[in-house]
Amino acid sequence: MASESQQHNKGESQPSENTLFPSGRHKRPPPMSYPPTLGYAPPPPHSAYPPPGYYPYARAPPPAYYVNSTVHQQGCQKSSSFLQGILSTIIFLVMFIFTLQLIMLLALRPELPVFHVEDFSVLNFNATMPTFTAIWEAYVSVKNPNTRLKIDFGPIHSHMYYNKDYILASANSPKFSMETKTRNVIHARLSANNTDNSVESRVVDKLAKERSNGAVSFHFRMVFSTSSRSGSWFRSNPRSMEVVCEDIKIAFAGASGDGNIAASADRDCLVLS
């Protein structure tokens, strides 16, 4: 009896899990937790990225070298300014020289010399194969029409052509100078016996056929360099000039080998520069 009463009292003192509290809910036991370990801090939270300044090798690399951008920009600006100054100076000099030459041309008004055939003759003309001989005597006048410019002529190289394509003879004449508003005569003596200029047989045949008609036309050319000057302050650069006297018709008397320029021949020469 005593044991039954003790069990009854024990059951009354310990409520069951289904005991309801006044709020009408069941009472749940508190969650279980482990007490902190003495002497050790809790581990830090895990991060996917390393902390700042972390380097996985034994020695960290030296700090990066940074160029001062301000000093670099100043150096580039100085170089650019220097190049711009040189370019501006060159442009200024070119414009100055061009303007000065233009002013001088307008003030001096240079004109090309005028050439005219005064006399032209052929001696000992023989177009009988296998030999061809002839001597040309050319007298060409040249006039300087300028009132302020003198003209200097370099050595003159003269050439005699047939049909504008076949060269027959060549010769050289000395250089000379001309004052303003003056006239001079260039004398050139050319011979077909020059060893440097051999005439082809087909050309000789054409000359013989034309000679049988009483007249032959030749083309006379002169090539030289020329420059102009005015006092001691102006002198132009030398330039090449070519003078062409075309269709100089030579009339022969009978069967002789001598002939002179025909009255109807064109005596004016063309100046190419």
Image: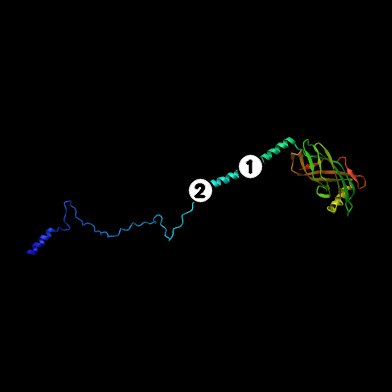
Q: Which residue is mark 1?
A: 89
Under tag 2, what secondary structure?
helix
Tell me if residue 210 comes above or below residue 108 in the rendering: below
Residue 151: mark in rendering = none
Q: From where the camera sits, is residue 266 visible? A: no
Dot 1 falls on a residue whose secondary structure is helix
Q: Which residue is mark 2?
A: 69
Tell me if mark 1 has few (under 14), some (14-19) or many (20+) residues whose alpha carbon lies within 10 angstroms of its own: few
Position of the N terminus, as image quadrant, is bottom left
Amino acid type, label 1: Thr
> Residue 15, relative to residue 245: is it above or below?
below
The amino acid type of the residue labelled 2 equals: Ser
* Of pointers 2 and 1, the one earlier in the residue sequence: 2
Front residue of 90/272: it is: 90
Relative horizontal placement of residue 22, taking residue 66 as reference (left or right): left
Q: Name the image quarter holding residue 250.
A: top right
Estimate the x, y position of residue 223 in percent, counting from the top left.
Answer: 79, 46
On screen, residue 93 versus residue 235, left or right, reads: left
Residue 40 left/right relative to 136: left
Q: Is residue 93 visible?
A: yes
Given residues 219 and 233, the one toward you in this image is 233
Q: Quadrant of residue 32?
A: bottom left
Q: Quadrant of the C terminus?
A: top right
Residues marked 2 and 1 touching at CB (< 8 Å): no
Whole-percent x, y for residue 81 in the image:
58, 44
Closer to the camera in the image, 37 or 190: 37
